[in-house]
Amino acid sequence: MCGIVGYIGYEQAAPFLLGGLEKLEYRGYDSAGICLHDGQELVVKKAKGKLEELKKLTDNGACLQGTVGIGHTRWATHGEPSDVNAHPHLSDSCRFAVVHNGIIENYLQLKDYLMSKGVSFRSKTDTEVVAQLIEYYDEGDLVDTVIKVLAKLDGSYALGVISKDNPDEIIAVRKESPLIIGIGEHENYIASDVPAILAKTRKIYRLENNEIAILRRDSVQIINTDKEPVTKEIETVNWDIDAAEKGGYEHFMFKEIMEQPKAIHDTIAPRIKDGKIVLDEIHLTAEQIRSFRKINLLACGSAYHVGVVAKYVFEKLLRIPVEADLASEFRYRDPIVDEHTLTIVISQSGETADTKEAMKEAKRRGSHVISIVNVVGSAIACESDDVIYTWAGPEIAVATTKAYSTQLAVIYLIALHFGELLGTLAPEEYSRYVEELQTLPDKIGQILKNEEKVQYLASQLFNSRDVFFIGRNIDYALCLEGSLKLKEISYIHSEAYAAGELKHGTISLIENGTLVIALATHEPLIAKTISNMEEVRTRGANVLCLACEDHPEVEKVAQNTIYIPKACDMMLPSLAVVPLQLFAYYVASLKGCDIDKPRNLAKSVTVE
Ligand code: G6P
């Protein structure tokens, strides 16, 4: 959600800025812009729509000269997507330019104040107040002025600032929104995320809250808001550069679906030694684990859906009550949480604003927090008590696939580990489950080999107007993800329904030809799900059933069937999600949708 880049060096800045913004497209945006110091003044070019528009406008950057500049992809919050609302924003007399990710919550008061002082505004954004405040409070020293302005701001921000009077500096600062500094040879960079700078450098600083970076061509200085120097370790990013590229695939989403066997293997293999799960990352004694009376799972989007699967898994294996909560709801409902509650926070990006705040709320109430995070060094990873990283590698497509799968794998690791410690799992059961877990990558590999069947079904069904996903128990948890995947990338209306709830409303929506995707993998309830399939079929539904290969009886009711290999019940979501991801992918592809960057969506939701 909003991407920031910045360059200061001896080369032309525009090519880096445009290239960097392209690498941040995955974050979601609806306009883009860049601002360069051309030796005389600040020159801004902005365009609504895709980055292509900005590239056309600037002749791929060729029409903008300058060796210092900032750029931005904007995901509209305050003010519609438009050229004028796009960043960078200039101050009244065009002496300062600002890019911003986050929300300035008190911008209306600040704007009123500035307008009463005669400042005129061009845009409807919250960000413009930052540029205007810098000019209003300017007394010559940009760092001093930025510090003064920060004290006036409520909310979250990652900011990049340049000044007409000082072509030799970029000032960068963050609070709650992510920002990294890339360290190059005679050039330095700012960016919202690593892919933007990976082609240039692997050496980075991760700015912490309220740290200010002063970038010059040959130096980076980091200070706090009292102007004291901050000593930081340089981090070396060890990502394979190809991991952040499409590598011959048409879309990142497809590549990431295909990467799931490896991602799951990389996530579980280092944590299983001689048939035993070793989770050194969790700093809890068996005694502490025994003292938990409840587990809370907090997350947003697909990560929340992992939480819903986890509820079934933990309650079955640990016999501890579990609540899976949407982070945005949890944080505002005065939750009942104390030191006897274990909180597990799930987030691919580690930056989702609601998840981060929900985590803080749980911590404030005395809960121990374990996070499951993909992005190393992200805010949630740093602020939780323990972090278990998913080793999915960079996930670029907005719709998550491999991060979801690796999060699920970590849930199994935790559940089995705790089950063994608490004695709720018999040793032979434990060993059997650990073995099962290790077979998941191969079984997913088999499903991926047979993806043509899913592609064929997508070609038959992609014109559906409404789709209902039904299932019971852990299948229902997976329906939530299957339905989200389909709607977010294909724009087909779809709903996930607990199959047992159908008769309480949804069945009235079933008409001739309505597509119902029935998940019938959960062995103890297959017969019941088949009854529900019959109920919708009788009313004209077109039923596509997803079942394990040893349950061909579903074909008696379903018009179409997708089979997955057998596995223990609780791990079946890891297998069943794959055909659902592929189905969503192919449907979206046939409908000509922008698969990796669906409209209105952002990968990293850094505002609430
Ligand atoms: C966005 C993404 C989803 C993701 C959700 C939570 O909506 O598009 O794929 O599940 O945010 O993000 P997180 O980074 O916290 O997992």
Image: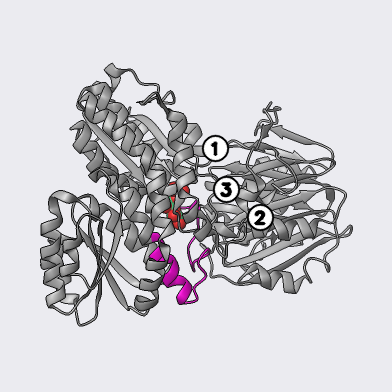
- Check the image and tell me how it is coloured: one colour
Q: What whole-number distance in Å separates the C-alpha atoms at marks 2 and 3?
A: 10 Å
Which element carries disc 3, helix, strand or loop?
Answer: strand
Q: In this view of the protein, which residue sits in the foreground, 27 or 126? A: 27
Q: Which residue is mark 2?
A: 99
Residue 306 in the magenta stretch? The answer is no
Q: Nearer the viewer, mark 2 or mark 1?
A: 1
Give the residue type that dot 2 points to: Val
Q: What whole-number distance in Å separates the C-alpha atoms at marks 2 and 1?
A: 24 Å
Give the residue type that dot 1 points to: Val
Query: For the view shown, which residue lies furthest in the bottom direction?
Result: 512
Q: In this view of the protein, which residue sits in the foreground, 40 or 273? A: 273
Give the residue type that dot 3 points to: Tyr
Magenta residues: mostly which secondary structure? loop
Q: Which residue is mark 3?
A: 157
Vertical position of residue 208 compared to residue 46: above or below: above
Q: Nearer the viewer, mark 1 or mark 3?
A: 1
In this picture, residue 81 sits left or right of residue 137: left
Q: Which residue is mark 1?
A: 376
Q: Position of residue 373 (x, y in %)?
A: 46, 40
Q: Is any atom of residue 358 visible in this view? A: no
Of callouts 1 and 3, which one flags the residue occurring earlier in the amino acid sequence? 3
Which element carries disc 2, helix, strand or loop?
Answer: strand
- Mark 2 and mark 3 residues within 8 Å of each other at the beta carbon: no
- Quarter of the view holding residue 527: bottom left
Query: Which residue is painted at 56% across and 70% down in the image?
Result: 81
In this picture, residue 550 sits left or right of residue 525: right
Span shown in magenta = 581-608
Residue 600 in the magenta stretch? The answer is yes
